Amino acid sequence: MAYLAMASPKPVLRATLASLLWSRRENEQARASLRQSVHELQDTLGAAWGHLFVTDRHHLSLRGEALDIDAHTLAQPARLSMDMLIRFEEILLEDLNGLDPAFDRWLDEERGRFLRIGRTVGEGLLAECGDPTAAIEVAEQILVLDRRHEGAWRTIIRAHAERGDIDAALGSYDRCRGTLAESAGGRPSVETEELVDRIRARAVPTRPRDARPGAPPSGPGRERTTLRLRVMALRTIGEERDDGLGVGLAEEISACLSRFRWISCLPTSPWPAEPAWGFSETSIEADLIIDGTIQRGLGRVRVIARLLDMRIGGEIVWAGRFDRELTDALALQDELGATIVAQVDPELMQHEGRRSAGARSHELTAQDLLLQALPAMYRLERESFLTARRLLELSLRADPASSVAHGWMAYWDLLYVGQGWADDPDATTAEAARLAERAVMLDPGDARALTLAGHVRGFLGKHPHEANALHDRALALNPNLAIAWCFSGLAYSYLGQHGEALRRMTIALRLTPSDPHGYFYDGALIMPHLLRGDYASAVEAGRRAVELNPLFSSAYKGYLSALGLMGGQSETVGILRRLMVLEPALTVRQAVMRSPLTRPEDVARYAEGLRRAGLREDAGHFLGELEGPTICHSVIDLLPEAPHSPILGAE
């Protein structure tokens, strides 16, 4: 039927169909199989539709005025639209692979033709675009179909430059160059290189004579969407000979920071000869710097690192002290570089969010809006949480091609469902999945977008295997991204691999022990401890999580389940009351339905703990005065396919 639909209204030889679908059979056997299939199709279609299926001795066809074939409509559009272009993302006949080698070859040819039509539709839309923002949106969609479409890449680069965002233009060029290099070692064309050279020539920074020392240059690049950060060679204090550790560590920190999409790392440099704290105009050309000192003594080394904001006179944004055994200098550089960068990233995001909060609305860039949204989102106060969504939408409107904005919006949807606030959880879940998929398509090399999308797929989509593929890719791109270690740990826990989950979460905590959003990391630890039967550790993690953020609803559920299984009566009642304030309608049944856990025995343990803690079973059972735990239906009622769990005891 698929083959006939694609050929419609032209008839197709029976011999052609037999050779496509039964190419590994003898000719007579293949024809017999085709006759049988034709007979079954005629019976299935019946009188109402059978007239569209035209058969004769040598040919078969689908035709008739009542026949509407979507692939034909897309291939011969009456008018061009963005919605139509998005349809070409769908894989043509995606469920028909593997029927026959000959049919697979035909499928590959048709899919290639379908994508070529999609590119043509996109190019037609580009020709109609009247402003740079619309052009970027269409061009990014063309790249979803063909990552090597240099015309689309040039459109994006040119459009960003026309908007005055030179950094975004050059960043898009870097994405283009990386994509082409991954495709059999390709390089941008001469036309693309010449365009970028012209943009760079326009972006030569200038500095007024009366500019404040350390301020970033003015000119066409002033609306940059990335922060310029330089790591200074760390200075050795004392009489010890400088063995290059300061420079080596600075280079390692720079290499680690360069993996973060929102930071532009300038080359490492030593402090200038003039007094270090003068911040003279010749000393630094960056928004922020990381500097530090190294001290040695008795086989140990102490490193003090600081993040300074040069736009406000070198104010200290963050500082950390790290004491280590000095055995292997290279291993020390690797470990300290990863730790420093993992701690700088969240601190810097918070700092930039606070800094942009005082700016006038017309001065805010897409990144400013995004960074303002994150603290409001993490606080989980409902009103500010809703405000965060509006900021994310404004950020995405300003930069429709931002993979990170798509990823954070998907994560916002995830929290909206997880907090029990979504009026239509299914619709919010579907929107989160769409945003997450878009984030990955826009920039497959963006580690943060990949791990955010992975968590959406694992938690809301309940596909932890798919989630782990994205998390692994994110960690390969940026092994210092603590949140990716945490999210991947959660995905392993959903799969029942709780030991591996704890190992990964421990790495996340080691990388960023003082993360401003540490409640999330503690909350993540609850479930693997609970499902391993270590209820005391689960309760301890739960206490830390709710103390750090008493509005984080998800932490209460695992915490409450662990208390129920431990039998901690007095604490249980208090935690249950607090959970009911956050989610008054929550039931055991709802908690189980939301849970991404895949193993029936894990779900059974989780549900039984909630039940013993006194959470009502479903909407028809009430808690009364919460005097003590109530035991309701067996968990088998919730999981009819699950084997009986020994933790239910005599029930």
Image: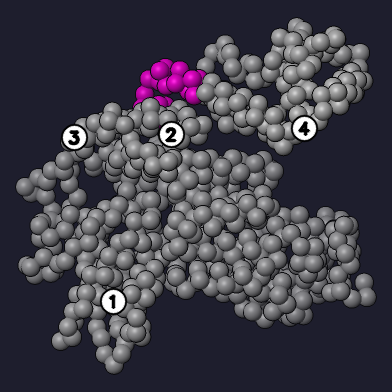
Q: Nearer the viewer, mark 1 or mark 4?
A: 4
Neighbourhood count class around disc 1 (C-alpha, 10 Å): few under 14, some 14–19, many 20 upward: some
Residue at image coords 47%, 29%: 142
Give the quadrant of residue 532.
bottom right
Q: Position of residue 78 (x, y in %)?
A: 57, 11
SS state under label 2: loop
Q: Give the residue at mark 1.
A: 304
Residue picked out by circle 3: 202
- In the image, taking residue 613 as reference, residue 367 lies left or right, namely left
Span highlighted in magenta in the image: 118-136
Q: Tell me if residue 431 comes above or below residue 290 in the rendering.
A: above
In the image: residue 325, left or right of residue 277: right
Nearer-N-terminus badge (3/2)? 2
Closer to the eye: label 3 or 4: 4
Quadrant for the C terminus in the image: bottom right
Q: Which residue is mark 2?
A: 148
Residue at the extreme bottom of the image, as rendered: 298
**How far apart are the alpha carbons under marks 4 and 2?**
36 Å
Pick the front one: 417 or 525: 525
Please report whichever mark, 1 or 3, sits nearer to the chain's N-terminal start. 3
Quadrant assignment for the N terminus = top right
Whether residues under marks 1 and 3 lie with C-beta atoms below 8 angstroms apart, the answer is: no
Kindly identify which residue carries mark 4.
Answer: 24
Q: CA distance from mark 1 to mark 2?
A: 45 Å
Q: In the image, residue 575 lies at what x, y percent?
A: 68, 71
Amino acid at the residue labelled 3: Arg
Real-space Cα separation, disc 1 to disc 4, in angstroms: 70 Å
